Image (cartoon, helix red, strand yellow):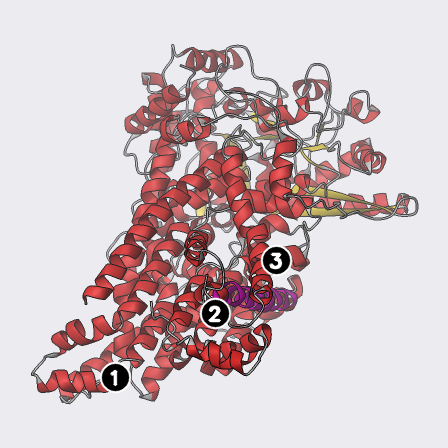
Amino acid sequence: MSEITTRGAKVAILVGITLVLIGFAFPLLFIVNTALKTQAGFYADPSGITTTLEFGNFVDAFTQVDFARFLLNSALYTLVSASVGTVASLLVAFPVARGFLKRSSVWNIVFILALFLPIALVTQFQLLLRLGLYNSQLGYILLLASAVGISPLLIVSYLRSFPIELDEAAAIDGVGYFRYLATFVVPLTSPVLITCFILQALGVWNEIILATVIFSDSDKYPAALGLHAFQGAYSSQWPLLAAATLIVGLPIVVLYASLQRFFVAGALTGAFKG
Amino acid sequence: MSKRSLPIALAAILLGSVTVAGCSSSSGEGAAEKINVVLHDNPPTNKALITMTKVFEKENPSITVKISFIPIADWAATRTARLSAKQVDITEGVTGPGATPLPDYVKGAPQSVWMKGVEAGNWVDLSGQKMLDNFIPTVIAALKIEGKSYQVPTSLNYVNGVFYNKEIFAKVGVEVPKTWGSFKTVLAKIKAAKIIPISAGGKDNWPVGLIAIGAAQSLYPTLAEQQALDKGLWANTVKLNDEKNVQVVDRVNTIYQYIDPSFAGVDYSTAQGQFASGQAAMTVDGTWAASQFLATNPALKMGFFPLPVSDTAADNRLGGKIDFTFVVPSATKHKAAAIKWLDFFSQKSNYAAFATAGGIIPAQADVALSPALESVKPSLTGEFDLAWDQVFHSNANAGSNVGPVGFNYSGLSPVGALKGAQAAQDAAQTDWAAGLAK
Amino acid sequence: MRHNIFGSSLAPRIGFAVPFAFIAFFSLIPAVATVVLSLTDLSSEPGIPVNWVGLSNYVQFFTGGNRNDSMAALRNTLIFALVVSVVLNVVALAVAILLNRRSRFAVFTRSVVFLPTVLGVTVVGLLWSLFFNPIGGPAQAVVELFGVRSSFFGDPKLALALCIFVQIWMSVGYSALIYTAGLQAVPGELYEAASIDGANSWHRLRFVTIPMIAPSMTANILIAIIGSLQSFQLIYVLTGVLNPATSVLSLLLFKIGFGLSGGTGQTQGFASAISIIQFALVAVIALIAYSYLRRRENQL
């Protein structure tokens, strides 16, 4: 971006950034504040700054529900589903982008339709049931991995921006198809693959409805549903709820902070060539 | 409209050409049997059932019982899913108008899912089981379908009660109201004393429905009058926006003005907490809540009276319902063990312990009332009248303005967007008329 | 069909067929089967006979006694999707431009803005339920300064607006990330050239930035439209399924399909019909938006 020169503009930008920071950080800090209150302290002054440091809330929340297990479940569901989904997207997108299949354009339309499929909660539930995969982590992962959404489309349009000569040069070298995909295409398309992975991972991470319907054992719940169930059981005990929220949220924040360079904008450059 | 049965066609579509055996089998036969009980979450009865089950397991070492208590918000979805997956041996049945076949005068409304299930043979016929004899005969009779019993009742409860804080009443200087006029005076005085007169959980919707049921109960105080209203509505000779029906909602509207002004966003347990902690002088709740209030605040000095919406004191009577029941799905692989557990539950001494700990109105005769219900005792008359929503056959094909009660408490401001009783009941009548058979 | 440079055409075909079959089996076929279910009266409880009922579920949706509920859900869905898509993109673009600098402060703020997205829907839902808690929440404390009390998510005039707000708050981070990627790909020389030509900052935004990031804009708007037309997890967490003021189509079908309508006679067949109606709605809107955005991209 062009450099800003005037002093007034600099101040305006600084104020702007500060406002954005407050808008996003304040609600997050408020929940920390609530988590440190006692139940009585919360009733006395629900929105004031806490006068206690009630770490017992965290102990209580942790002893009542196994949040560590929920978090591990979520990590498993998210990593496996998004990885399988991304690989599957690449595998279906590459031959379509390169025109290796009959009627590539038809397949492209199928990808577009797949984008906004009707919500198939009822049928997916029945499908898992009949496959003997009710209340199974595998079944849940399979359903979520197959929900590739926009990914094949993104990959097709990204691949089309690369010259086909690259493929041909590789073919002359006598590299096999899958080897070629793994060693040439994956690195070339890594920005769009990371985008697809993140998109799908966010979808899995936030899923609670399918999990409500599919799992009968609460120890298979993902973190989002575990926390939701906890909220159902302790709906008015806000300090306890806030502590539970932080127990679920903190590991994510730490993980995110340490993996941030993978999220940085650079990785996404050019992923949206249209 | 062709009415061919099609489960096979469906299965073919769902599975494509793949055939897979459902292999989510449970424990092996013989040695240890495990039964799954799936119930809605209600802390006092949860505890009582867990305690009882521990004794049961000790006496029947070959049977282990896993009880899941599902939060209300997820209850219906979870029950559906568990039944479909055949991973439940005992769950809850249905009471109220959906428990028995629709009467002749109800035309064009679908049968309840429960009735369809009974007709399809989804539930184990418990007729002739000895345990049923332990319960009050009229309760068992009320649940019978064509002479057969499928449900084991757990409890009765009254729904249109007002719990009040005796200390606040004394401080403000008001007496227990017997009529609508005196109730309004009490409400006004408490409000003038800068205390929240009533707490209610509008966010969860059904808790404010209790107010509407109570209003209908007072203004249609006898079973005959309630049945006449039900019939008249289905015959389209009585309208939901007739003067008297608007009056019912108008009184609900008056009560709304005295609830904590933000009640539409408050959930049920917060509203209970407001009353139990002494922030609100009263709350409209069922008798099942009494033990919860005392558990939250053992020092609470509370009393109880029927919601007085009628100007005639005698018409302000309690109305109740048969509370949750146990049923056994036919798909169970552990029928004998499931019935054994139900039988154990029904035995006089076990049931008495459950009633005491659970703080419910017993469905067996000669069982002592739980100490938690001490406040309720003076209001009990020895008769058990059904509440309006247990008599009224609502229509699933009519919208949420009709709802389960017919009196549009959820469309009425501030819970809904309709201002005033007339607008709320006009909307209800429009929906009701649209849902009637043409 | 293009000549396959890898010799045998078998490898790409297998490579395509296996994952496609997987996606089809678990996602496409259940979606198509929903059409079939929508023509039946499949019950939410198992073991109950199923009958063909033709189009009566659709007729019921548009003309039955519950049409007020159906139409309210339809209206809420459209309002929710429209407002979220427009406001989210404006805010996200503004935030992306504001934070597209190298200072540590800007980089740190960028990561904080993205946090709600990674924290997930229940954490965000709880956070704002606490914030807008009618009994003593901080928002109530502010409102009380003006002498009123609000029930926030319980207020039928306010509930949908608050859900929209929280949805946008949660999604800004991701949208801004996509815009940031687009912005960083814009060559700096373009701005210099524009400055020499005497362009002010509005002109630079209108004639340099926006045309250059048009592809990110297309992607962002499409993701927002499809996502918000189908999204209901956040509303589910914030207000539950029973609040008519925030009932959207996907929430309505969950409520009916899994028996939350109070064990009445409504069926999973009816829920499936709602699902198909929603599909038609999303398809029409998304395709119109897509073709418009692509045309615009080429014109800019």
The reply to whether residue B292 is in sight is no
Disc 2, disc 3: CB below 8 Å? no
Q: Position of residue A208 (x, y in %)?
A: 54, 55
Residue A144 at x, y percent in the picture: 56, 58
| Residue at 36% in and 70% down | A272
Q: Position of residue C60 (x, y in %)?
A: 42, 28
Question: Mark 1, residues whose alpha carbon is within 10 Å: few (<14), some, or many (≥20)?
Answer: few
Number of other residues with Cα within 10 Å of mark 3, as a class: few under 14, some 14 to 19, many 20 or more:
many
Observer-side mark, 1 or 3, equals: 1
Identify the residue under disc 3.
A142
Q: Position of residue B14 (x, y in %)?
A: 61, 42
Contact (Cβ within 8 Å) of mark 1 with mark 2:
no
Q: Chain of mark 3?
A: A
Q: Which residue is denoted by mark 2 in the rendering?
A: A198
Q: Which residue is mark 1?
A: C187
Q: Secondary structure at mark 2?
A: helix
Please state which amino acid type lies under the numbered disc 1: Pro
Q: CA distance from mark 1 to mark 3?
A: 42 Å
Whether callout 1 and callout 3 share a subunit is answered: no
Q: For the residue marked with disc 2, what is the amino acid?
A: Ile
State which region is magenta.
A69-94
The chain that hosts pointer 1 is: C
Q: Are marks 1 and 2 on the same chain?
A: no
Mark on residue C48?
none
Relative vertical location of residue A257 with respect to residue A158 in this rendering, above or below:
below
Asked if the stretch drawn in magenta spans residue A81, the answer is yes
**Image mark count:** 3
Quadrant for residue B257, please give it. top left
Task: Please report whichever mark, 2 or 3, sits nearer to the chain's N-terminal start.
Answer: 3
**Viewed as shown, does residue A117 lie left or right of B354?**
left
